[in-house]
Amino acid sequence: MQIDRVYRGDCVEVLNSMPEQSVDVVFADPPYNLQLQNDLWRPNMTRVDAVDDEWDRFDDFSAYDRFTRAWLAACRRVLKDTGTLWVIGSYHNIYRVGAILMDLGFWILNDVVWVKTNPMPNFRGVRFTNAHETLIWAQKRRGARYTFNYEAMKALNEGLQMRSDWELPICTGAERLRADGAKLHATQKPEALLYRVLLASSAPGDIVLDPFFGTGTTGAVAKQLHRHWVGIERDEIYAQAAEARIAQVAPAPFDPAVFNTRRKRAQARLPFGALIERGLLRPGQQLFFRDNDALAAVILANSQIQCGDLAGSIHAVGRALMQAPCNGWEHWFFREPGQARGRPIDLLRAQVRREREQAHDSA
């Protein structure tokens, strides 16, 4: 299997030619089976550029279900046991897709609602404006280790835990690919949506597969983030547009400090005593719980801390003070001489980790 390439052809046939367990993440934007019967018109009698392409037409629900089962099974075969799959859809198809992927053995981790900030209105006024689409995020094997960059998502959301409702605009403006003034692809997804998906569930160097590649949004964002990509597209016009688009993407040179978003739990364990050995903290120095002067502890030579009658690790003493689980790295603060406010000791841990990584890279 060649990476960073668009494969032409039927997605199931191409997938079945690929090695088993060869990709880390799948993002799929399959046909929605919208079942449009007639043209749609605005109140001013201009025709709506709706999804009426041949690739979105199926004889009946049974035909759509057979198609869905075939491509999902093929994706499951090439997905690593630690891999995850994203699939997006609307009310027309997402419930059928969800049931089939569960039947095939996928385990659903989340459903995410993409709330469109600028949706197309319901011109006939007979239904609610359809202002969202649903993404299902599922792992191949229940209980297997999978990638979720929790801290990166939290940082992207200004320090708050990322929720499962994502408010993002639809693809418009310069990002929308056009031919002779018309949309090149009716359902081109915004890069902001794929950025969030790939940042959350992949790492630099991972292989991201999109079996319905279209105009290449998945590949463009994967390249920006230094992920590898594989696209499958049967329409030659779409495939050529995707290749041209991705060729224009020029990501910054890879720097682990910029593009790695590893979870804290996945990083090498570092004992609190390493900070004392490095001289970043010293025996007898005070730490402050939640930067509170009334809850000061003294660092002991054996790397434990003492706060009043309490003595133990930074986690044990913090747990006793909170009477709840406590990550001492985040709750204990140190102060430089003359400073009234402190900084979390986790900053010092990050410094030591960076020094170790740099030493490893230069070895």
Image: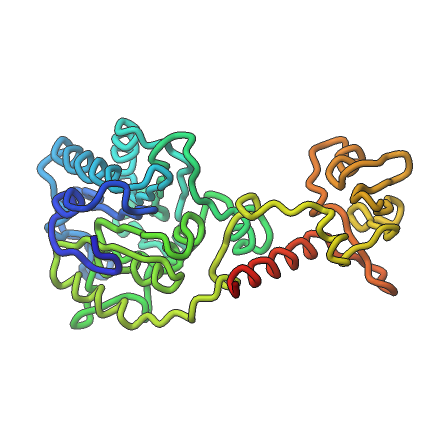
Residue 236: horizontal and vertical position, in percent? Answer: 11, 61
Residue drawn where x is 64% and y is 47% of the image: 270
Horizontally, residue 1 falls left or right of residue 152, namely left
Horizontally, residue 223 falls left or right of residue 44, namely right
Horizontally, residue 211 falls left or right of residue 172, namely left
Residue 342: horizontal and vertical position, in percent? Answer: 79, 57
The answer to whether residue 44 is above or below residue 308 is below
The answer to whether residue 330 is above or below residue 96 is below
Residue 39, visible in the rendered structure: yes
Residue 28: horizontal and vertical position, in percent? Answer: 27, 47
Coloured how?
rainbow
User: 348 and 183: which one is in front?
Assistant: 348
Residue 277: horizontal and vertical position, in percent? Answer: 75, 53
Tell which residue pokes out farthest to the front in this image. Answer: 363
Tell how many labels: 0
Residue 48, visible in the rendered structure: no
Residue drawn where x is 32% and y is 67% of the image: 175
User: 351 and 64: which one is in front?
Assistant: 351
Residue drawn where x is 38% and y is 55% of the image: 193
